[in-house]
Amino acid sequence: MIRNGDFEPRLPRGTELYPVLVTFDTLCENPLLYRWIVDLCSTKGLLNGDGVRPVTLANVADYEALLACAVSGNPITRLLKERSGRWRNRRLDLQLFDADCPRRLPEMERIYSDCTGNMLEGFSAALRANAKQNALD
């Protein structure tokens, strides 16, 4: 659709594409899996051709880390461009670790901290109430 101009003028036909397949599961990435994806895409006429970088697999956690990299000032396109070279067919989490990317978006980190803090506070209150009841018994 991009190459047909369906998104012009917002997205020009010649835009370099960096396909990322986001999964809910870890797919045990390895070069053979990536080769299978390339062959399947070639057969189906998907995610290949001029100006299309290699497909990157990302489970949801790695995708969040990829976005967190961008928030921290590390451009996603630079990271995905590197997947045409030494990071080709390698696990994204290893590349993100090598690039020293944060694992979570800052807002998600705050939400997680608030949530766990509230749970710990609730557990502590329940333990105090239980201890007080045991003392009365």
Image (spheres, rainbow, N blue to C red):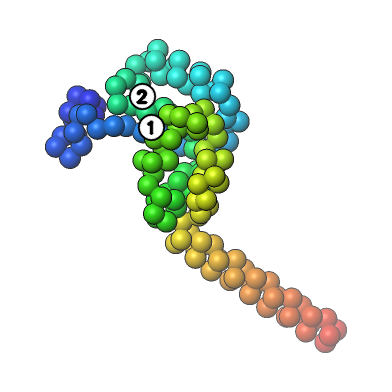
x and y percentages locating residue 110 in the rendered image: 49, 65
Q: Earlier in the sequence, mark 2 or mark 1?
A: 1
Residue drawn at the location 52% of the way across and 27% of the way down: 89
Q: Is residue 64 visible?
A: no
2 and 1 marks in contact (CB < 8 Å): yes
109 versus 48 height, above or below: below
Residue 75: x %, y % from top left: 37, 47
Residue type at mark 1: give it. Answer: Pro
| Other-residue count near label 2 (Cα within 10 Å), few / some / many at <14 / 14–19 / ≥20 | many
50 and 9: which is toward the camera: 50
Question: Mark 1 sits on what residue?
Answer: 19
Residue at the front extreme of this rendering? 86
Q: State which quadrant residue 3 falls in.
A: top left
Horizontal relation, residue 28 to residue 126: left or right: left
Label 1 crowd (10 A; few <14 / some 14-19 / many >=20)? some
Residue 87 is at least partly visible in this image: yes
Task: Give the left or right position of residue 59, taking residue 15 as reference.
Answer: right
**Secondary structure found at label 2:** loop
For residue 131, above or below residue 25: below
Image quadrant containing the N terminus = top left
Q: Residue at x 41, y 19 (%)?
A: 41
Mark 1: which secondary structure? loop
Q: Position of residue 39 (x, y in %)?
A: 45, 15
Residue depicted at x 38% and y 41%: 78
Q: Which residue is mark 2?
A: 47
Label 2 and label 1: CA atoms lie apart by: 7 Å
